[in-house]
Amino acid sequence: MNSWPNTGPGTGVGTRWGMGMGAVWRAARAAVLRRRLQTVVTGLVVLCGTTTIMLTLGLLDAATTPFDRAFDEQRGAHAVASFDIAKVSKEALAATARRPGVEAAAGPFEQVVVSFPRTTDIPEAEGPLKLVGRADPGGPVDRVHPLHGRWARAPGEIVLNLRDAGRPLRPGMLGSRLLAPGVPPLTVVGLAAGMSQSADAWVTPAQAAALRPSGVQMLYRFDSASTEQDVRAGLDSVTAELPGGALSVAQSHLELRRAFSASADAYLPFMTLFGVLGLLVAVLMVANVVSGAVVSGGRHIGVLKAVGFTPSQVVAVYLTMVSVPAAAGCVTGTLLGNVLAGPVLNTAFQGVESGSAGIGISPWVSVVCLAGMPLVVAAAALVPALRAHRLPAARALSAGGAGSAPLRGRGLGVQRLLGGSRLPRPVSLGLGQPFARPGRTAMTMAAVVLGVVTVTLTTGLTSTMIAFAEAEASPVPQVGVRAGRPVFQQTAPKLDDARIEALLRSLPGATHVTAKVFVDVHLSGHAQRSAVNFQRGDPSALASQVVEGRWPAGPGEVAAPPSFLVQRGLAVGDRITLELDGRRVPALIVGQIMSGDPRFLWSTWATLTALAPGTGADHYEVRLAAGADADAYAAAVRAAGPGLHPSIVRPDTRAAATVVGVASVFTTLLIVVASLGVFNTVLLNTRERRRDLGMLKSIGMTPRQVTIMMVTSMAALGVAGGLIGIPGGMAAHRLIVDNVGVVVFPESMKDIWDAPLLVLPALSGVLIAVLGALVPARSAARLTIAAVLHNE
Amino acid sequence: MLRVSQEDIVRLDGVRKHYGETAALDGVSLRIGAGEAVAVMGPSGCGKSTLLNMIAGLDRPTGGTVVVAGEDLGRLDETGLALFRRRHIGMIFQFFNLIDDLPALDNVALPAQLTGVPARQARRRALELLDELGIAGRKDAYPAVLSGGERQRVAVARALMNRPALLLADEPTGALDSRFGEQVMDLLIDLNQIGQTLLIVTHDPQLATRCAGRLVELADGRVARESALERAE
Ligand SMILES: Nc1ncnc2c1ncn2[C@@H]1O[C@H](COP(=O)(O)OP(=O)(O)OP(=O)(O)O)[C@@H](O)[C@H]1O
Ligand SMILES: [Mg+2]
């Protein structure tokens, strides 16, 4: 095998091009063709790396901006204003569209609140619904996104607003009839999602008018609306010329955004984390593979210089050589990333009430990948290429590598020790290899360690998240019971609060009953809205989620989720004052629960008695015996009292599914990238050692011994990589779970490591290394040595 | 089954080797007796190295039979060939082919260690050989710091490590200047005089006439001429 056929300027290219790009291109092309496998590996690593980065950036992008994006796409309303129909005319309202500061307005639309009893299986069609009469989902503001079916065209038709557009359509939803007292039956003809949340459902204007509307709705976009003040200023401008008291209520888009991110917040840290990890590993691996390709060309560099390539041309040859597969990998990776983004992002955002926030990949991500990846590749190639630039030709030629042959023994002691050991010679030779080439060894180790850290970290995070999701979901069947409220045109229960509790306890299956009520309270000295959930009876299932301190037991004791405490700068042990209608009750934060809404506190009934005596519970949490039939219990509740509305709490496994899904995709991608990195390193190693391998075979090393030697050297790195990578991954896991912020994991969810869980990461290092080594090692074993020995 | 006379170490019959279109060897038959020293000469590209590779079992012929030290190489698999080389063949190359990462002593000891000889014993014999070849003082040096002549003597020591029936040398002096070349030549002569069978490929007529008793000339993959040489003293 001739090392470099027809690559030099001597082939005639030089005459026309001088020693210009022609020669460089030909030399690079020959290099690419001759190292097909390595070229393919480089391309694959860049491909997987690009895909990982695409998903990563897509994830980060979607995690931070889906609300804004969907909101802007739909030209969401900065303010949804309800006006009193008795105080202002529709003409006057329509005229507000031209007020200063108003960018666009839609309406007036008539609106009415209708309370639907539970007649269907559709949660969106239950309870008090705000119905708005709109002829058209489009318009200048709040372009409602149609999901299924069509818009309402005739009276008797209704379109429901889906709060979570990503959920699959349940059969029978379209076409079901909604019945409410005093209202003609309404047939669901469509499902839509509006980011402005301007209505729970839409009907035709004529239908709305027929329902005796209590108010009309105006939807506004303002010139500036980024702060509450802006929104308030806009509303002031709108109402300036209207009669006083015409505006009954207005909802700001900022509030919606906060609500949106509150539900997304629990996931974002994990998504971000996987994203950053993916980015890091992909960039490092690409750098590793690319620089490896350049480093391994040491001898070739000597040849090129000997035939008259200038140092800059040598650099150019190397850059061209890696840019061919890199460009191919980058483009394919971007395409693949775009294809995968849909399913992956949908999995990632399953649990988030996204409305119609289309969770897709934005074009800038593709642009960044297509532009950024080549930069990473070029940078990775440039460092060793510049080293090649300086390398004297003679040194490169005589040493048979980029000055890599040891003049004095590297790792001399180790080599001698191994040579004199009782180990079979192929094994000791293999063990000695990593010490002979510290640079290459460091690169391989980096690949293996990253792979192991990734596997360890994702294994750990997955376990933590599964434990978290399990803790959130009740281990026993659970039924929530709401007392009907006349304000929502529901029948009030005949029994009083205490009797309801007693009744729920007496029904078969119940083991724990907690009576609860949410009361909006003011927290002295804190501007944010707060609500306290006062509880009576058995401690709620939440009590098991206390991660610090304890569950409130006595008067004036409260527990809070981390987000509540962080937002207000409080900690367990701090004293606060609850205020309601002029009464002030001092309270002590005695516990922190794992996670929860930043507005909510939990406290005891004794606290409520001090704050608002006489308030009764309006909902009840019933835990049933394990294996009890929740449906039967719910039926029994319904039969026992007409004003009681039971609903079965179904464990929500989506959180766990989300994390596991995303973790698996990234783990797979990262392991593929890491294995390819190792594979590539061994490949280069083998190539570099071809002459040695040929010689070893010529003195009688059997193919088996060659394989043993090569695999041993990599397995040694795998073990070492595992030893470094596992603690590294565990430390990274700890760092992350300790700093999520909105979730405080109990120690039991952080300390998830046990022997079986560590087996996978422990094996992964060796597995990555050995798998990576096996193919090149076997091909080395089959190497036809005659050619190698003579020519290299 | 080919009957091989006890004295014939090498017996080639109609050996052909094709690389695609090129016929590197085109029907070569050759016998080398025990204790003989044979030189192979011929223009560049005539197939000398290919011939050597066939005999060492480093590559397989396209046709014909190769029998070396009583073994029909065509019947051996890769592992069998490796074991055959280990037992019967020592090789020396133009570019030495030492392992850069190992000091001289460990390079020499390697062939014995591959057969499972304990390290201590292998190193002892390696040191004896280096001593005989006059470079025992360089035993801990790495190949990169050895001179060409020293490297080639280390390579010879390594080739002799397992007491091979046949020593193959492919242009052993090709990369050496005349002074080091002479040293290596003297070494080969001495070895042959104590009974070592030799096959030397060379471009150097002086090396051929000084070291070998018989000359085989190749041209275009065929044996063009065979002649006895009178050894120059
Ligand atoms: N691995 C190979 N693949 C293809 N062709 C080969 C291979 N090895 C040798 N050849 C061809 O076979 C022919 C004989 O090659 P060989 O190396 O045996 O010649 P040689 O006599 O040793 O030449 P030199 O004196 O230059 O060393 C040449 O034409 C060569 O190009
Ligand atoms: Mg030759």
Image (cartoon, coloured by chain):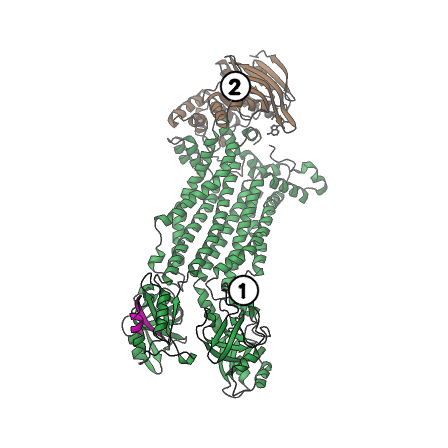
- x and y, in percent, of residue B106 in the image: 43, 29
Dot 1 falls on a residue whose secondary structure is loop
Ligand 1, seen in the image, is in the quarter at top right
Q: Provide the letter of the chain coloured brown.
A: B
Q: Which residue is mark 1?
A: A358
**Is A198 placed left or right of A314 in the picture?**
left
- The picture quadrant where one finds residue A75 is bottom right
Q: Nearer the viewer, mark 1 or mark 2?
A: 1
- Three-letter amino acid code of the residue under disc 1: Gly
Q: Which residue is mark 2?
A: B68
Is A576 part of what is drawn in magenta?
no
Q: Is any atom of residue A47 visible in this view?
A: yes
Looking at the figure, which quarter contains the C terminus of chain A? top right
Q: Colour of chain A?
A: green
Looking at the figure, which quarter contains the N terminus of chain A? top right
- x and y, in percent, of residue A88 in the image: 54, 87
Part of the protein shown in magenta: A501-518
Q: Against A302, is A266 above or below?
A: below
Q: Chain of mark 1?
A: A
Q: Give the camera-side residue of A388 and A614.
A: A614
- Total number of numbered labels? 2
